[in-house]
């Protein structure tokens, strides 16, 4: 009689041990919940090193271009619509992904950053439409000589303000936003109204704006201190993102602002004319900069999804083991079933 009782005690002890393991696993998952969302995930050492390598490589490319920045190249008016169409979709998709992060976290800072990327996408539209010779000799929307240059200033000066607001709100750790849907709609409407207002200022209010370009020469932007001010504003935005415990979004957003410094320097500070080397090179830097955060969002979200599915499969297997201890006749969960479950749920295994 003692032997069965001893086996029963062992089974109960093993069951209790399994329950403790499951509770510990649950507690660990709760503690790591902040890492499930990219906007709150901490950057790893590998990510920081990768960002540093890219930053150094972009600096080297910038320094290599600087001596030839004012070399005139072939006029390609179609370059602007092509380049800005790609930039529009990159910024728009980034904004949508950030709005999704906001919907899950309800963080006001993430909402402001998403609105900033939406602003970046929408202001590209009037800039492309008003660019001379892109769609019309003097541009569309009633554009005049100063219109496109001022839209460039509004564009490159406005986005850093959104980044600075995001950094400030993130450090304040404000209360979570209530009403996710209305907040997103309000942010989108506010951005649309802001872009419309700036477009009207550059078209209808053209004659009240200072002259910053003459026959394609925008060196007045530098002499009047406008483009250097935009450059310094971008530098300040990058500085506000610095934190000892860097988040993934902040790390790559810093890299975006770092490369934007080269974009503005080549296209509006060191460069002086449209269609010179600085004009083209600056915009290529800008396109590269815009791609970094989007690529990071897509890759990291896929990685987190795969990790969540793997964790769910592991939890399912442990629960099955616990059930088997309680009911010896239960069918054990085979390894092949778990791997099949992961493959069905994880898009990374699709062929």
Image: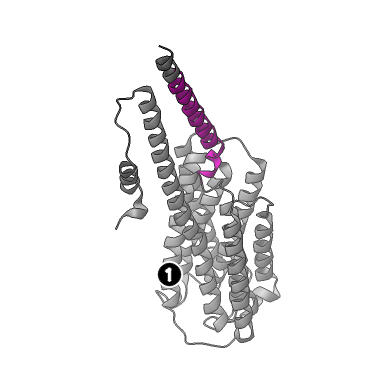
Is the magenta region chiefly helix, strand or loop? helix
Residue 249 percent location from the top left of the image:
56, 53
Judge left or right: residue 37 versus residue 345. right
Is residue 141 visible in the rendered structure shown here?
A: no
Q: Position of residue 242 (x, y in %)?
A: 68, 55
Q: Position of residue 252 (x, y in %)?
A: 57, 59
Residue drawn at x 50%, y 34% as measured from the top left: 25
What residue span does the magenta drawing correspond to?
Answer: 9-37
> Which quadrant holds the N terminus?
top left
Q: Choose top left, top right, bottom left or bottom right for residue 321.
A: top left
Q: Nearer the viewer, residue 45 or 128?
A: 45
Determine whether 180 is above or below 230 in the image: above
Q: What residue lies at 61% left-to-right and 82% top-to-bottom? A: 64
What residue is at 43 percent from the left and 69 percent from the top?
A: 140
Q: Which of the 4 image quadrants contains residue 160?
A: bottom right
For the C terminus, the quadrant is bottom left
Residue 18, magenta (yes or no): yes
Tell which of 348 and 192 is nearer to you: 348
| Magenta stretch: includes residue 81 | no
Q: Can see residue 95?
A: yes
Horizontal side, residue 204 vs residue 346: left or right: right
- Residue identifier under label 1: 140
Of residues 214 and 178, which is closer to you in this image?
Answer: 178
């Amino acid at each position: 009689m003692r032997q069965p009782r001893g086996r029963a005690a062992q089974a109960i002890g093993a069951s209790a041990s399994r329950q403790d393991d499951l509770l510990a696993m649950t507690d660990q998952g709760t503690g790591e919940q902040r890492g499930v969302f990219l906007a709150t995930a901490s950057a790893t050492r590998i990510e920081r090193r990768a960002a540093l390598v890219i930053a150094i490589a972009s600096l080297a490319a910038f320094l290599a271009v600087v001596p030839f920045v004012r070399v005139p190249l072939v006029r390609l008016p179609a370059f602007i619509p092509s380049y800005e169409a790609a930039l529009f979709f990159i910024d728009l998709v980034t904004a949508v992904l950030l709005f999704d992060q906001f919907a899950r976290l309800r963080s006001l800072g993430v909402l402001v950053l998403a609105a900033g990327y939406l602003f970046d996408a929408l202001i590209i539209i009037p800039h492309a439409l008003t660019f001379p010779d892109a769609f019309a000799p003097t541009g569309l929307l009633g554009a005049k000589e100063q219109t496109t240059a001022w839209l460039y200033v509004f564009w490159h000066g406005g986005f850093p303000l959104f980044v600075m607001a995001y950094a400030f709100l993130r450090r304040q750790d404000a209360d979570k936003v209530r009403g996710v849907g209305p907040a997103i709609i309000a942010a989108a409407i506010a951005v649309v109204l802001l872009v419309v207002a700036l477009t009207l200022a550059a078209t209808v209010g053209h004659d009240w704006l200072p002259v910053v370009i003459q026959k394609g020469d925008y060196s007045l932007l530098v002499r009047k201190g406008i483009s250097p001010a935009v450059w310094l504003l971008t530098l300040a935005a990058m500085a506000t993102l610095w934190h000892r415990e860097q988040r993934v979004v902040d790390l790559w957003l810093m890299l975006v602002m770092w490369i934007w410094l080269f974009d503005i320097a080549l296209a509006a500070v060191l460069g002086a004319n449209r269609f010179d080397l600085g004009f083209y090179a600056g915009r290529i830097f800008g396109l590269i900069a815009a791609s970094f955060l989007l690529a990071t969002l897509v890759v990291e979200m896929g990685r987190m999804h795969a990790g969540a599915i793997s964790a769910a499969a592991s939890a399912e297997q442990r629960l099955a083991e616990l059930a088997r201890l309680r009911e010896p006749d239960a069918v054990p969960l085979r390894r092949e079933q778990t791997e099949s479950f992961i493959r069905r749920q994880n898009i990374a295994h699709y062929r």
